[in-house]
Amino acid sequence: MTTVVHVLRHGEVHNPDKILYGRLPHFRLSERGQRQALTVAEAVAGHDLAYVVASPLQRAQETATPIAAAHRLDIATDAELIEAGNVFEGQRVAVGDGALRQPKAWPHLVNPFRPSWGEPYVEIAHRMLGAVYRARDEAEGREALCVSHQLPIWTLRRFLEGKRLWHDPRQRQCSLASLTSLVFDGEALVEIVYSEPAGSTDPKVTGA
């Protein structure tokens, strides 16, 4: 029995101050982000979606809304799909600017492998995998869609591909409103398919 779990990154966020918003509340989609969500809804309109679930953060819920509506589904919420925790949340972190220039921030940068500035990669991978398995069970034999965030999605993908979890953020293949689709034969993962129905975006852009 084939089940597909699509893991969708939310659309662009309204972030005029260009801060690392992380898990902060009230960060909504920008107008572009709303268009991206509609584009994804159109792209999956012909899919056999049985279950739509999202991170509790506003931007993820808003991204899920047109998709769930098109399939006449309610949006479930799974806290394990939330953005990764980060000590620099609420601050500007662009290179050469903001929090990273302050000496008090430097102790948080000593270990990029865990990482020392936030939630451990292995914990992100495990909670995301749990969320995917729950969605797979809800949509057994059909398709599910989970709305999450860039780092959790990319960490999950690297974990499933057997790659080291620490990485260069500039090399993430996880554009705004992109789909990382996990194809299961029964309980066995047999394929990972990546697609960008709303087009590609630069992973280095703060606030994206």
Image (spheres, rainbow, N blue to C red):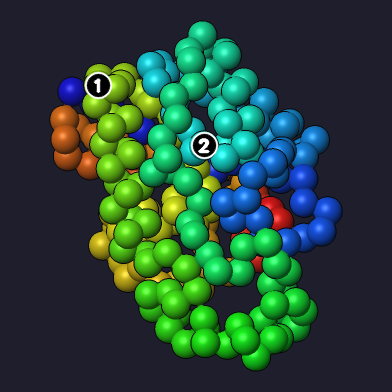
Q: Is residue 91 above or below residue 53?
A: below
Q: Is residue 59 above or below residue 69?
A: below
Judge from the rendering whether residue 137 lies leftward or rightward of residue 125; answer left or right: left
Residue 173, position as x, y percentages in the image: 52, 57
Q: Quadrant of the N terminus?
A: top left
In the rendered image, which residue does mark 2 sit on?
Answer: 56
* Mark 2 closeness class: few <14, some 14–19, many ≥20 residues within 10 Å: many
Closest to the camera, between mark 2 and mark 1, is 2
Q: How many marks?
A: 2
Q: Quadrant of residue 14?
A: top right
Q: Is residue 156 left or right of residue 29?
A: left
Q: Residue at x 57, y 14 (%)?
A: 69
**Residue at the image point whose x is 26% and y is 62% from the top:** 162
Q: Is residue 61 above or below residue 165?
A: above
Do tag 2 and tag 1 residues touch (Cβ < 8 Å)? no
Label 1 sits on a secondary structure element that is loop
- The spot of residue 196 in percent (x, y) is 57, 42
- Percent x, y for residue 174? 53, 52
Along the viewing direction, whichever of 1 and 127 lies nearer the viewer: 127
Q: Earlier in the sequence, mark 2 or mark 1?
A: 2
Q: Position of residue 131 (x, y in %)?
A: 33, 39
Q: Name the residue furthest right.
A: 16
* Residue corresponding to mark 1: 140
Which residue is the extreme one toward the bottom? 103
Nearest the camera: 194 or 129? Answer: 129
Give the crowd class for mark 1: few <14, some 14-19, many >=20 residues within 10 Å. many
Name the kind of residue labelled 1 in the image: Glu
The relative height of residue 87 versus residue 4 in the rendered view (above or below) is below
Q: Residue furthest front?
A: 104
User: Secondary structure under badge 2?
Assistant: loop
Residue 150 seen in this snapshot: yes
